[in-house]
Structures are given as C-alpha cells and as structure tokens.
Image: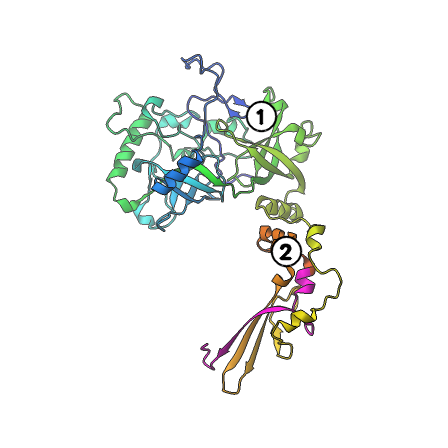
Amino acid sequence: MSHPDYRPNLATPRGVSSVVGPHGVGVSPGDKKSKNKSTRGKKKSIFETYMSKEDVSEGLKRGTLIQGVLRINPKKFHEAFIPSPDGDRDIFIDGVVARNRALNGDLVVVKLLPEEQWKVIKPESGDKEPEGAYESEPPGELCGSRVLQPSPKDCHDSPDVIIEAQFDDSDSEDGHGSTQSALLDDVKRLSVCVHEKGKEKASASATKDKSTSVAADIRALPEKSLQRSAKVVYIVEKKHSRAATGFLKLLADKNSELFRKYALFSPSDHRVPRIYVPLKDCPQDFVTRPKDYANTLFICRIVDWKEDSSFALGQLAKSLGQAGEIEPETEGILTEYGVDFTDFSSEVLECLPQGLPWTIPPEEIRQRRDLRKDCVFTIDPSTARDLDDALSCKPLADGTYEVGVHIADVSYFVPEGSELDKVAAERATSVYLVQKVVPMLPRLLCEELCSLNPMTDKLTFSVIWVLTPEGKV
C-alpha cells in the first residue's frame, strides 16, 4: 500500500552504512574513515536519550520545556505538532528524529529549537497548513543516499541530516531499493546545525553554505511568519496503543544474519515505524511461501524501540484474515485504537441483578418521585435497541409548562468501585461502527434493565423545568 506522501520512519544518519544489527542501523565494520579504533563498529544513535523525570519536571516549571499531545499528519508523515500552551499557532516537530520514538496521540514533552531552525510560513498561505522552511531545491550533492553536512564538532544540539525518502512496498528494510534514488522533493527539510553564527569556514560544504544563508533569511523575517519548532525530549504517557495492522515481508538481504531471525512488519498506518518481528512468531511456512501471506492482515505490537534503530522491535499478535474484508479490517482498527471489544467477564456480569424480569424494590420507589402517571415518551427511532432518554411536557394552571428530560439511571446498577464500574471506566464510551457497536456496558443493562421501554417501570435521573410559553425558565 503506497502513498504519494509516504515518508517512512527511516533515518540514515551521515557516516552510517546500511549494515543493520538486531536493534537497527549500525556503523559498517569496514568503515575506514573511523580513526578512533575504540569506537569503530559501535552503533551510532539515531535518537536522543530521553531526559530524566527530574529534569523534565524542572524544565516544565521554569517554562523551558512544553508538554502536549503529539499529532502526526496522516498525509505528510514527517510533520507533527503539539498545541501551543498560549493558544497560539501549533508547535512544529519536523521528522522522525525530532519525534524521538513518540507515536501519534502520546503525551510528550518538547524543547524548542533555536530560532533559526523554526519553520517559515509563506505569507500568502495565511494560517493554512504551513509549508516547510527550506522550499528551494537542495544542491546536487543531496541526490544520492548520503548527504553532506557540517562535521560533528560544528554541531552540538542538532541531529544528523535525515532523508525521509519515498517508499513503496517493494522497498527493503535496510535502505536499498528506491532509497538510493530518493526524490529530491523528499529532501526538503534538512536538520542542519547553523546556530554557530559567524564560525562557518569558507571551505564548508554546499549544504552548509545553503543552510547558513537560509538561517540568515529566517532571522530577517518578521516574527509572525515563523512557526516555532521543537524536538521531543520525553514521553509522559504512551497513549498510542503501540499496536498496528499491516503486512509481513521477508527481509531483502537473504545472506544477512537478520534474515534468519526476523521478518519485516510493514504497518498500514505509515505514522507507525516498520517493525522487526521474530520469525518464530510468524506462520510456519512464511519463510518458504511468503507470497501466500501477501494479502493477509496481521496485528503487531511494538515492544521496544532502541536509540540506534530506525525500526522498532515487535511481537506478532495474531493473523486477522484477508485484507479488505470487513471483519478483519474492523478488528484491526479496534485493536490499533486500543478499543476493548472482548466479551464482558463473569465477574462483571455478576454485578447485575440475576433474576429476570427485574422489578424495582418497594423501598427504592419510596425514595423517588413517581412520574408513572405522566405522559413520558422517548424520541429514539423504532430501530433503537436501548431507549436511554425520554421527554415529558404538561401545561400548568398558570399558563406555564412543566418540561422534563429523563435519562435512564445507570448509576443504580453500577456500584462505585465494582468490577462493572472499573471496566466501564476503562472503556469510557460505546464505540459505534458502521455495522456494529462495541458497548461500554453489558447488553443486559442497556437493553433490558435500563431501557425505557413502553409500559414498563424504570428508574431515571430526571431534570424538570417550569417554562413560560416563550420558553424562558
């Protein structure tokens, strides 16, 4: 499943070859440029180490760090945002490295980047979706899979240059395939270090010259045409389920050690990284007959994502069935979004009255206002299974009206702290799909005990107003 804007979470830092270890990208063992023998062969980190809880807490108090829910643009996967605390324009987070292994919906803490790395908003676009800061064509050196960039001693805070290349499903896990001829359009945003003003050497690369001039242009712009940019430094809460639906593939390099241990899981949602899954999790004949599973939808859960890896590590949860069929696709969607669609346990069902039909106890009737003689009617359609709200209206002698809104009293059947209360709190809501409903509460409660069916005694929570003919309370 390819997408015109598909930018996978693949980072190939400068000086890192396509040799991939079990946890991701590693430096080529034969890297002759590595002068320090003690560091040769060690994996290079792609992502920054998360800050400590104490430093994050202090930074949030001092206002040097900002907390918010991460939103990744589903159509431009390198773009992510968090809301600005002051209600101003969203804060921009550019690319997989800046996201630092956070997924869509996670509660994260970010640190603002230097102003020269902020995003330029085109004046004519107004407040519409902003464009990238570096709109001009990148220099010719950027056409290949490697990118020229300032040397590490010139750059302390910024990540390496990242190419987020366009992929389709034929691309391999290790950067071969179409990555080598990545489209220039996909190299628009380069995370380059330009904040050491005035220190650039005359012999710097074309990339650095270009980025320096861009930084100078940015500083000359009025403040309102910039969008603050940031990087993720901590994940407060992993709200994303870490589950994804997608397809299994063999690794491209049949001679690698990885090939004998892992398969590659390619999520349908391209905001989720590609995932290595152990072959022992896969169907027994997957290695010998991979094409038999080309159209089979699987669920995979991320269990780890190392700092030195472009890909996450995961476990294959289950095979859903054929892609495109409604039930497998539905189960995949529910799992991805963390919706609990399992049957209610016996412990939960035991919280409800066991003898049916249930009748209201006399002591409960004595404690309540009796509205059974009033004309109370539901306005749910005839196809509704649970009639959970109703209305009443009657004229009073002084010309006003008594108007009532009556909601089925679920709280009577859900004691606080009970197993039923806990599972309902976790589900939080009923989920309505095109062809089915995943209920928050058991059907016995919704459709029998609480449903305001005609000519049956039921408990409600009622609010009653007296209104003038003009509708004033």
* Residue 213: numbered disc: none
Which stretch is magenta? 445-473
Reading the image, the residue beneath label 2 is 439
Mark 2 crowd level (few <14, some 14–19, many ≥20, 10 Å Cα): some
The vertical placement of 360 against 304, above or below, is below
Measured as percent of width and height from the top left, residue 451 is found at 66, 66
The CA span between labels 1 and 2 is: 44 Å
Q: Is residue 5 visible?
A: no
Name the outermost residue toward the bottom. Answer: 397
433 sits left or right of 283 in the view: left
The vertical placement of 410 against 395, above or below, is above
* Residue 252: numbered disc: 1
130 sits left or right of 220 in the view: right
The vertical placement of 67 against 48, above or below, is below
Between discs 1 and 2, the one toward the N terminus: 1
* Residue 117, image quadrant: top left
User: Quarter of the image containing the N terminus?
Assistant: top right
Measured as percent of width and height from the top left, residue 96 is found at 45, 35
**SS assignment at label 2:** loop
Look at label 2 and name its amino acid: Pro
Queried whether the magenta region covers residue 155, the answer comes back as no
Looking at the rendered structure, the number of numbered marks drawn on it comes to: 2
Q: Residue at x 30, y 47 (%)?
A: 123
The vertical placement of 428 against 211, above or below, is below
Look at label 1 and name its amino acid: Ala
407 sits left or right of 106 in the view: right
Marks 1 and 2: which is nearer the front? 2
Measured as percent of width and height from the top left, residue 69 is found at 45, 45
Q: Is residue 288 visible?
A: yes
